Image: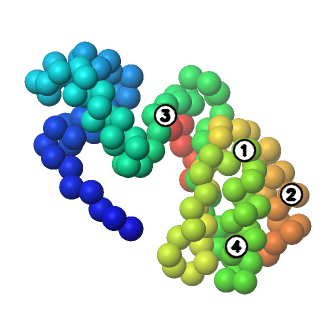
Amino acid sequence: MSFYQLDDKDLEILALLSKDSRITLSLLAEKINTSIPTVKSRIDKLLGLGIIDKFSLILNYDLLSSHPLYYILIKTSPKELNNILTKLSSKKEFLEVYELISESQVLVKTLPMEMEVLQEILIIDIKQLFKFLLTKLFVTKSS
Protein backbone atom coordinates (compact mmCIF):
# COMPACT_ATOMS: atom_id res chain seq x y z
CA MET A 1 0.00 0.00 0.00
CA SER A 2 1.30 3.43 -0.95
CA PHE A 3 0.91 6.46 1.25
CA TYR A 4 0.51 9.89 -0.26
CA GLN A 5 2.02 13.15 0.90
CA LEU A 6 -0.64 15.82 1.13
CA ASP A 7 0.29 19.48 1.10
CA ASP A 8 -1.33 22.18 3.23
CA LYS A 9 -3.94 23.04 0.57
CA ASP A 10 -5.05 19.40 0.31
CA LEU A 11 -5.30 19.19 4.10
CA GLU A 12 -7.32 22.41 4.23
CA ILE A 13 -9.70 21.09 1.57
CA LEU A 14 -10.14 17.81 3.46
CA ALA A 15 -10.75 19.63 6.75
CA LEU A 16 -13.42 21.85 5.21
CA LEU A 17 -15.09 18.97 3.35
CA SER A 18 -15.15 16.84 6.49
CA LYS A 19 -17.14 19.58 8.24
CA ASP A 20 -19.52 20.16 5.31
CA SER A 21 -19.27 17.99 2.20
CA ARG A 22 -21.86 20.22 0.48
CA ILE A 23 -19.62 23.30 0.56
CA THR A 24 -19.40 24.92 -2.87
CA LEU A 25 -16.20 24.97 -4.88
CA SER A 26 -16.27 28.76 -4.88
CA LEU A 27 -16.51 28.94 -1.08
CA LEU A 28 -13.75 26.34 -0.73
CA ALA A 29 -11.55 28.34 -3.10
CA GLU A 30 -12.24 31.52 -1.16
CA LYS A 31 -11.49 29.91 2.22
CA ILE A 32 -8.14 28.46 1.12
CA ASN A 33 -7.23 31.43 -1.07
CA THR A 34 -6.96 29.68 -4.42
CA SER A 35 -8.95 29.35 -7.66
CA ILE A 36 -12.06 27.26 -8.26
CA PRO A 37 -10.36 25.14 -11.00
CA THR A 38 -7.49 24.41 -8.59
CA VAL A 39 -9.92 23.27 -5.88
CA LYS A 40 -11.82 21.11 -8.38
CA SER A 41 -8.65 19.47 -9.71
CA ARG A 42 -7.40 18.79 -6.17
CA ILE A 43 -10.72 17.20 -5.15
CA ASP A 44 -10.71 15.13 -8.35
CA LYS A 45 -7.13 14.04 -7.55
CA LEU A 46 -8.10 13.09 -3.97
CA LEU A 47 -11.07 11.11 -5.30
CA GLY A 48 -8.93 9.42 -7.96
CA LEU A 49 -6.32 8.39 -5.42
CA GLY A 50 -9.02 7.00 -3.13
CA ILE A 51 -8.16 9.42 -0.33
CA ILE A 52 -11.74 10.69 -0.55
CA ASP A 53 -13.83 7.56 -0.76
CA LYS A 54 -17.27 9.15 -0.97
CA PHE A 55 -19.38 12.06 0.12
CA SER A 56 -22.09 10.99 2.54
CA LEU A 57 -24.67 12.27 4.94
CA ILE A 58 -25.36 11.81 8.63
CA LEU A 59 -28.99 11.27 9.55
CA ASN A 60 -30.54 12.72 12.67
CA TYR A 61 -32.43 9.66 13.92
CA ASP A 62 -34.01 11.68 16.73
CA LEU A 63 -36.11 13.41 14.08
CA LEU A 64 -36.98 10.18 12.28
CA SER A 65 -38.14 8.00 15.16
CA SER A 66 -39.21 8.16 18.77
CA HIS A 67 -37.44 4.85 19.41
CA PRO A 68 -33.82 4.69 20.56
CA LEU A 69 -30.72 3.41 18.84
CA TYR A 70 -29.05 0.46 20.54
CA TYR A 71 -25.41 -0.50 20.82
CA ILE A 72 -25.05 -4.20 21.50
CA LEU A 73 -21.92 -5.95 22.72
CA ILE A 74 -21.97 -9.64 21.82
CA LYS A 75 -19.48 -12.33 22.79
CA THR A 76 -19.26 -15.47 20.71
CA SER A 77 -16.84 -18.33 20.18
CA PRO A 78 -13.88 -17.86 17.83
CA LYS A 79 -15.22 -20.56 15.50
CA GLU A 80 -18.61 -18.81 15.19
CA LEU A 81 -17.21 -15.29 14.86
CA ASN A 82 -17.05 -14.99 11.05
CA ASN A 83 -20.48 -16.52 10.56
CA ILE A 84 -22.11 -14.27 13.12
CA LEU A 85 -20.38 -11.20 11.63
CA THR A 86 -21.75 -12.13 8.21
CA LYS A 87 -25.26 -12.72 9.55
CA LEU A 88 -25.33 -9.51 11.61
CA SER A 89 -23.96 -7.46 8.70
CA SER A 90 -26.72 -8.74 6.44
CA LYS A 91 -29.50 -7.46 8.71
CA LYS A 92 -31.00 -4.21 7.43
CA GLU A 93 -31.86 -3.21 11.00
CA PHE A 94 -28.17 -2.98 11.92
CA LEU A 95 -26.33 0.16 10.83
CA GLU A 96 -22.81 -0.88 11.81
CA VAL A 97 -21.15 -4.14 12.85
CA TYR A 98 -17.60 -4.22 14.22
CA GLU A 99 -15.33 -7.08 15.21
CA LEU A 100 -13.50 -6.13 18.38
CA ILE A 101 -9.92 -7.16 19.05
CA SER A 102 -10.48 -9.01 22.29
CA GLU A 103 -12.21 -12.29 22.99
CA SER A 104 -14.35 -12.78 19.87
CA GLN A 105 -16.56 -9.80 20.59
CA VAL A 106 -18.81 -7.92 18.20
CA LEU A 107 -20.25 -4.42 18.58
CA VAL A 108 -23.49 -3.68 16.74
CA LYS A 109 -25.24 -0.34 16.22
CA THR A 110 -28.93 -0.64 15.36
CA LEU A 111 -31.47 1.55 13.67
CA PRO A 112 -33.99 3.12 16.03
CA MET A 113 -36.52 0.43 16.99
CA GLU A 114 -38.74 -0.86 19.72
CA MET A 115 -37.08 -3.16 22.26
CA GLU A 116 -39.50 -5.94 21.30
CA VAL A 117 -38.34 -5.79 17.69
CA LEU A 118 -34.70 -5.96 18.76
CA GLN A 119 -35.42 -8.94 21.01
CA GLU A 120 -37.19 -10.70 18.17
CA ILE A 121 -34.24 -10.19 15.83
CA LEU A 122 -31.64 -11.29 18.37
CA ILE A 123 -33.50 -14.18 19.94
CA ILE A 124 -35.62 -15.59 17.14
CA ASP A 125 -33.59 -14.80 14.05
CA ILE A 126 -29.97 -14.93 15.23
CA LYS A 127 -29.81 -16.90 18.50
CA GLN A 128 -31.35 -19.95 16.84
CA LEU A 129 -28.43 -20.05 14.39
CA PHE A 130 -25.51 -19.17 16.67
CA LYS A 131 -24.37 -19.49 20.22
CA PHE A 132 -23.54 -16.11 21.67
CA LEU A 133 -23.81 -14.12 24.85
CA LEU A 134 -25.29 -10.64 24.88
CA THR A 135 -22.89 -8.99 27.30
CA LYS A 136 -24.04 -5.35 27.21
CA LEU A 137 -26.85 -3.33 25.73
CA PHE A 138 -26.58 0.45 25.52
CA VAL A 139 -29.55 2.66 24.68
CA THR A 140 -29.19 6.14 23.22
CA LYS A 141 -31.47 8.78 21.80
CA SER A 142 -28.77 10.71 20.01
CA SER A 143 -27.14 9.32 16.92
User: Mark 4 to mark 1: distance in Å?
Assistant: 19 Å
Q: Position of residue 120 (x, y in %)?
A: 84, 51
Q: How far apart are marks 3 and 4 (CA)?
A: 28 Å
Lateral position of residue 125 relative to residue 104, left or right = right
Q: Which mark is residue 93?
A: 1
**Residue that badge 4 annotates:** 82
Q: Which of marks 4 and 1 is in front?
A: 4
| Mark 3 residue element | loop
Q: Is mark 2 on a helix, strand or loop?
A: helix
Identify the secondary structure beneath mark 1: loop
> Is the residue under label 4 in contact with that under label 3 (CB below 8 Å)?
no
List x then y, in percent, for residue 35. 17, 21
Q: Residue drawn 83% across and 66% down?
A: 127
Report whether residue 15 is seen.
Answer: no
Q: Along the polypeptide, which appears first: circle 2 or circle 4?
A: 4
Q: Mark 1 or mark 2: name the one nearer the start of the chain.
A: 1
Looking at the image, residue 126 lies above or below residue 55: below
Q: Distance between the residues labelled 2 and 4?
A: 17 Å
Q: Can residue 102 be seen in this view?
A: yes
**Mark 1 Cα-neighbour bin, 10 Å: few <14, some 14–19, many ≥20:** some
Judging by the rendered image, the residue that carries numbered circle 3 is: 56
> 10 Å neighbourhood of mark 4: few (<14), some, or many (≥20)?
some
Identify the residue shown where x is 49% and y is 31%. 57
Which amino acid type is shown beneath numbered disc 1? Answer: Glu
Q: How far apart are marks 1 and 2 (CA)?
A: 12 Å
Which quadrant: the N terminus? bottom left
